[in-house]
Image (cartoon, rainbow, N blue to C red):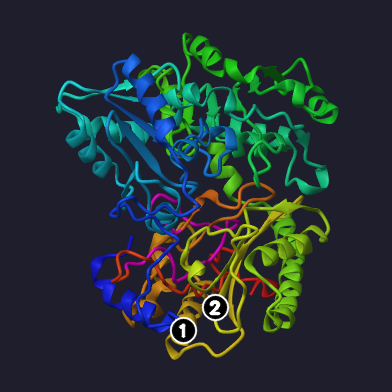
Amino acid sequence: MQPLPWVAAWVLLLHGYATSHVPQARTDIRDCSTDPPYLPPTTTNTTGRLAALRDAMRALGLHAYIVPSTDAHMSEYIAERDSRLRWLSGFSGSAGTGVVTQDRAALWTDSRYWTQAERQLDCNWELQRTTWIQSIGLWILQAVPAGGNIGLDPFLFSIDTWNSYSQALQGSGRTLLPTQTNLVDQVWGDQRPPNASGKIYSLPEAFTGSSWQEKVAGIRWQMEQHTRHPTAVLLAGLEETAWLFNLRGDDIPYNPVFYSYTLLTNTDISLFLDDWRLSPEARQSLQAQCPGLLCVELLPYGQAQAHLTHYVQGNVTVWVGTEYTTYGLYSTIPQEKLLEDSYSPVMLAKAVKNTKEQELLRAAHVRDAVAVIQYLVWLEKMVPQGQVDEFLGAQHIDALREAQEHSCGPSFQSISASGLNAALAHYSPSNGSSRVLSVDEMYLLDTGGQYLDGTTDITRTVHWGVPTPLQKEAYTRVLMGNIDLSRLIFPPNTAGRTVESFARRALWDVGLNYGHGTGHGIGNFLSVHEWPVGFQSNNVPLTAGMFTSIAPEWGGALPDLRGGVPGALRPQPHRPQPNVTGTDPVPEHLL
């Protein structure tokens, strides 16, 4: 979120960007102050869903129920089946938390999604413009009487988040109560989407940096070298298992992962998944060396917790990465048998690309750049004719990528946004409600591709007419920050947070800023946002072999004197590229 001193700059930028300086009523966001309330067609009527949830809460003696926007693996992107907050509230943003009491419902989200929330929530919901758990805790203390019970599903909350809620409610007379059944799933009933059923397949050897057997040996070596000598590593993040075994799936849109857990011990390998979905080649790869130290035992996905409970009865120490392990799974392990790090050794090994992985990722970006250039040339020709809207543009860039070798589809839903829509983080157009691209407005393209050899995330902002002087300056200063950080040479193991200010400095010089992170890790045919690489305080230090995007931008939800309506331009040159450490230069083809 932006600090208050930036408000003057926000309003100035809005003034310079708007097509008209005359305040106009917005008809695309809700207005709960009127009688009857005004609700745009993008909202969802949640009255019946909230009533059903409250009935389920009363049956368990719950005064409040917390609904996150996560799944059981702490995934950033989640399957429709796990989109509980979206089903309950209508809000489809990727980050949010809902709390429902017997007479109130509130949603917390960050500045990227404030306007989206106002477009999608009906008037049953209060919008809280923050994501701080302290804010949620204070709201609960005000809404729930002393002696009340606050329910939540322990398998949808990280360890840190659970502890933060516990701390916020400590000594208040309210009780944090884990539920055996997810109440949203219960009221969703048979309308809830089915379990994933797609094939789980082996990544061809040509597109892997090393064999899964070599990766397992490397992790076991780390276990032996650790001073605590852990006997097992528990993998709960979906990317971890997919990377370790060179397997891919399609359980989550745009992310080639599959629902799974792994328990890797000194002597055994237990993989929890729906094994009937494995391709013959994948099954053969995993069990070719059975019996033995490199034999993978295939167990049902639903047995992970029971198996772990049995394992920890012995003289063992389990190494967990707390960022991707839910409290429900974590609480299964006695404290004296835990070895905790923010990220598992698999997550950290995945973050550092070896030579082959680097080559593969660069090759994917070169082909992806061809598709983006083709698209920009097409726009240059078509936009002046008034023949392209946001939805058609998104379809066209996706088609151009699909024509590239090794393409496996987009890496996220394409963001094709013109004019004021470009101020909405993660805005995606729909057929029938799409803005026509105009030479008089800025246009934001934020898209990416999945390829067998790599994942991409590319953003471009263009203007085909005559931008205002303020637009030119804002765009130029964003570009300056991109160049400054791209060319920076710094020692290995430097924290991303330390160098991040180079991307902001040119904006800071004139009182501007952007309200989000500067970049994120890039996967090898995995997630478009690959943790733990990046420039935030909870990212790991940067070292050679890590790949990050550099994405300074002006955007997000900005305050407007007419009542919180965002209207920022988002100039954001964005070039995914390898992190620069020591004297390693940025490859010319990525600049």
Q: Position of residue 167 (x, y in %)?
A: 23, 33
Q: Are marks 1 and 2 in contact (CB under 8 Å)?
A: yes
Few, some or many residues within 10 Å of mark 1 (<14, 14–19, 20+): many
Q: Amino acid at mark 1?
A: Gln
Question: Can you tell which mark lies on residue 35?
Answer: none
Q: Left or right of 495: which side holds 211? A: right
Residue in the foreground of this view, choosing between 151 and 326? 151
Q: Position of residue 251 (x, y in %)?
A: 66, 36
Q: Left or right of 259: which side holds 533? A: left
Question: Can you tell which mark lies on residue 442?
Answer: 2
Quarter of the image that includes the C terminus: bottom right
Residue 360 occupies quadrant: bottom right
First in sequence, mark 1 or 2: give its number.
2
Q: Nearer the viewer, mark 1 or mark 2?
A: 2
Q: Which residues are magenta?
A: 535-559
Residue in the foreground of this view, choosing between 104 and 213? 104
Residue 530 vs 239, above or below: the answer is: below
Can you see residue 267?
Answer: yes
Give the overall secondary structure of the magenta segment: loop
Q: Residue at x 39, y 69 (%)?
A: 501
Residue 117 among magenta residues: no
Q: Amino acid at mark 2?
A: Met
Secondary structure type for disc 2: strand
Q: Residue at x 55, y 44 (%)?
A: 77
